[in-house]
Image (spheres, rainbow, N blue to C red):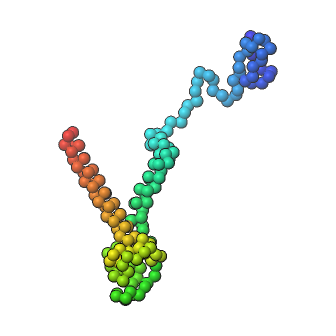
Amino acid sequence: MQPDTTMGPGLLDMSNGGTAAVTPEEGTVPPGQQEPKKSATPLQDSLRRLRRDKRAMVSLGIIVLFIVVPLIGPVIYQHVGGTYQSTLNGPISPQLYHNPFHQELDRQDEFISGQYWFGTDAIGRDLMARLMQGLLVSLTVALLVEVVDLVLGVFVGVLAG
């Protein structure tokens, strides 16, 4: 018995006791076959999972911040502020007073200002400049440790066969 398709594709005709079959719509895949899935590479899968994890994205943002600030920060920060007249040293330019090693004894323990974003320490050194310098030193040490680790790992791996 042929299914009645007068009611439209995919609809059941119950007039003959409910034994009619469902006819597939055009463009659909037959029941025994599945559409081929687009396979993603393992890298694409892991990046998709990383983007969905909010904690991982916040952590990645902090890591990127710790890398970008010491590399780009001093270039920008040394042009912030204007020249001021020091009572001990005469005119001081931003390039000098934002130097992490420059001491300005008449600016001891200064609070946060437009000139010193994190203030100064007990001997008048800029804390923001010192923080960026410390981050740069930490990054350099971390990279050197990784290079030594890589060289030793390759050396031991070659010896082990």
Residue 89: x and y in percent read 34, 87
Q: Residue at x 24, y 47 (%)?
A: 153
Residue 67: x and y in percent read 40, 60
Res 1 quadrant in image: top right
Question: Does residue 6 appear left or right of residue 63 in this picture?
Answer: right
Residue 66: x and y in percent read 40, 60
Q: Residue at x 19, y 43 (%)?
A: 159
Examine the rendering and report whether any part of residue 120 can be seen: yes
Q: Residue at x 31, y 57 (%)?
A: 143
Q: Residue lying farthest left?
A: 159
Q: Exactly how many numbered labels are in the figure? A: 0
In the displayed structure, 60 sits above or below 38; it is below
| Residue toward you, 119 or 70 | 119
Q: The C terminus is located in which quarter?
A: top left
Question: Does residue 21 appear left or right of residue 48 in this picture?
Answer: right
Question: Does residue 6 appear left or right of residue 144 in this picture?
Answer: right
In the displayed structure, 46 sits above or below 120; it is above
Question: Does residue 112 appear left or right of residue 121 in this picture?
Answer: right
In the displayed structure, 119 sits above or below 12; it is below
| Residue toward you, 69 or 127 | 127
Examine the rendering and report whether any part of residue 95 can be seen: no
| Residue toward you, 50 or 1 | 50
Q: Residue at x 71, y 16 (%)?
A: 21
In the displayed structure, 104 sits above or below 130; it is below
| Residue toward you, 2 or 84 | 84
Residue 36: x and y in percent read 55, 31
Res 120 quadrant in image: bottom left
